[in-house]
């Protein structure tokens, strides 16, 4: 039941957010409290409440009933707040060092009250400022190995996994991904947003029937392949970091889907830096290698030690699964590269490049690399071949 008296949803104001924090006993009533709405994402309100006197701070995240990035004309379910809170709790049990602590949730107000991570920076912002976060790839590899394994049939057992599949049915948020990643960028959709100079490259992409067939296959995979509980939006804007700490936030797109989707989003969002960050290119290539190597080794370890399905615990079947994850992830990475360049939701890695010539050249590369990865995903057998293809295209 809601801790606030009202039983209906209302967007919080800064004052109401403080009021809620006080009622929850998370900050002291008569202290000198400050609250600022700091949400800069596409969908939600985020309140940062600080009690300086007692050295305490918290975050209150509230879902809005529409997509903030577009406005009230795009209604969106508030149920995503519950999905996000439930996912944070599950991922927090599986990979506690990489997930913020949840203090309170309220389904009516669509809020999640959680640990303040403002001593960290959003990884994308840090990368653009020139930071490289030496441990981020190892941490993301460990985080994903654990969440992908422990939410699968092999980590949970098929009965519990089926209950989870039901719990995380998330049709509205999945539709956003289905449209914005797998559909709209591949035809002349209204949601698309690209620079005029990219017109010829985009026209070529829309006419590429071979590419569109591959994307249909990947989209089918996304629609039907309920392998693991995905974060569902694991780009570098969903990761807080500093040189020794990494936290994964914002799993409101969580649902049961193909493991390669989360892996591919991490690959793609590191690839943006490989493309735009001349100075640190080798570091980001190394990050991609470390991320996959750690994921593969930790997942293999869990597969052998924690597998609930004795008959599945063979190295041949483990190899089959890892190879499937890898190939899928390369295709999904290609889709992410393309949609972040010409679709509705862009990335600052590309858009913040002031020099037009350099920016357009980078965007041409992301499109080219995206197409290549989608088409070649089944031929790219290992990390070495993946990096070779990346270096050849960019
Ligand atoms: C309308 S939402 C646009 C994008 O923002 C989210 O973070 C997801 O990446 C989604 O595709
Ligand atoms: Mg998000």
Image (tube, rainbow, N blue to C red):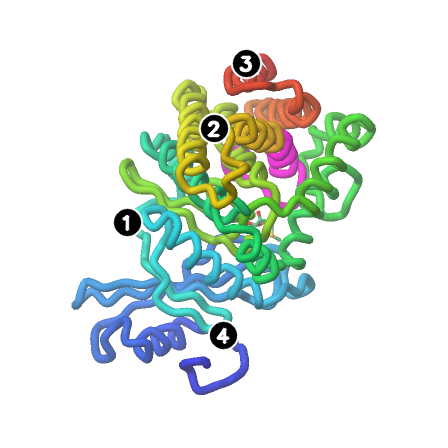
Neighbor class of circle 3 (other Cα within 10 Å; few <14, some 14-19, many 20+) is: few
Name the spot of residue 339 as percent of width and height, x first: 65, 38
The dot on residue 119 is 1
- Distance CA(mark 1)–CA(mark 4): 27 Å
Query: Dot 2: what SS?
Result: helix
Q: Can you identify the residue that label 2 sits on?
A: 273
Asked whether residue 352 appears in the rendered view, the answer is no
Name the spot of residue 89 as percent of width and height, x first: 42, 59
Q: Is residue 170 left or right of residue 280?
A: right
- Distance CA(mark 4)–CA(mark 2): 37 Å
Residue 353 part of the magenta segment: yes
Q: Can you identify the residue that label 3 sits on?
A: 388
Q: Is residue 85 left or right of residue 182?
A: left
Asked whether residue 292 appears in the rendered view, the answer is yes
Q: Nearer the viewer, residue 318 or 210?
A: 318
Neighbor class of circle 1 (other Cα within 10 Å; few <14, some 14-19, many 20+) is: few
x 56%, y 56%: residue: 159
Name the spot of residue 228 as percent of width and height, x first: 55, 46
Q: Are marks 3 and 4 in contact (CB under 8 Å)?
A: no
Per the rendered image, the range of residues in magenta is 331-356
Q: Can you identify the residue that label 4 sits on?
A: 109
- Distance CA(mark 3)–CA(mark 1): 37 Å
Query: Dot 1: what SS?
Result: loop
Query: Sequence order check: which comes first, mark 3 or mark 4?
Result: 4
């Amino acid at each position: 039941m809601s801790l606030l008296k009202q039983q209906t949803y209302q967007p919080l104001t800064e004052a109401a957010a403080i009021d809620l924090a006080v009622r929850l006993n998370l900050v002291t009533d008569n202290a000198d409290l400050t609250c600022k709405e700091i949400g800069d994402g596409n969908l939600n309100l985020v309140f940062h409440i600080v009690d300086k006197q007692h050295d305490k701070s918290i975050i209150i995240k509230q879902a809005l009933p529409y997509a903030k990035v577009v406005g009230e004309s795009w209604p969106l379910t508030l149920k995503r707040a519950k999905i996000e809170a439930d996912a944070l709790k599950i991922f927090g049990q599986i990979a506690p060092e990489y997930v913020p602590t949840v203090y309170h949730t309220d389904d009516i107000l669509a809020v999640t009250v959680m640990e303040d991570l403002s001593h960290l920076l959003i990884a994308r912002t840090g990368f653009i400022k020139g930071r490289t976060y030496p441990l981020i790839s190892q941490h993301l590899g460990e985080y994903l190995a654990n969440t992908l394994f422990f939410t699968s049939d092999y980590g949970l057992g098929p009965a519990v996994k089926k209950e989870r599949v039901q719990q995380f049915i998330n049709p509205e948020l999945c539709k956003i991904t289905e449209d914005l990643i797998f559909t709209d960028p591949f035809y002349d959709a209204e949601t698309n947003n690209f620079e005029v100079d990219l017109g010829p490259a985009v026209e070529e992409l829309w006419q590429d029937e071979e590419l569109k067939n591959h994307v249909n296959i990947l989209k089918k995979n996304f629609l039907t392949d309920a392998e693991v509980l995905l974060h569902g939006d694991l780009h570098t804007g969903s990761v807080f970091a500093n040189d020794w700490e990494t936290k994964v936030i914002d799993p409101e797109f969580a649902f049961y889907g193909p493991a390669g989707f989360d892996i591919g989003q991490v690959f793609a969002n590191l690839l943006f830096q490989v493309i735009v960050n001349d100075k640190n290119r080798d570091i980001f290539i190394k990050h991609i290698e470390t991320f996959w190597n750690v994921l593969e080794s930790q997942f293999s370890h869990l597969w052998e030690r924690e597998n609930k399905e004795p008959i599945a615990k063979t190295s041949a079947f483990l190899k089959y699964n890892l190879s499937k994850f890898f190939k899928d992830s390369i295709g999904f990475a290609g889709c992410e590269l393309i949609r972040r360049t010409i679709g509705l939701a862009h990335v600052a890695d590309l858009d913040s490049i002031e020099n037009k010539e350099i920016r357009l050249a980078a965007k041409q590369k992301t499109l080219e690399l995206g197409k290549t990865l989608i088409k070649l995903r089944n031929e790219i057998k290992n990390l070495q071949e993946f990096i070779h293809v990346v270096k050849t295209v960019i």
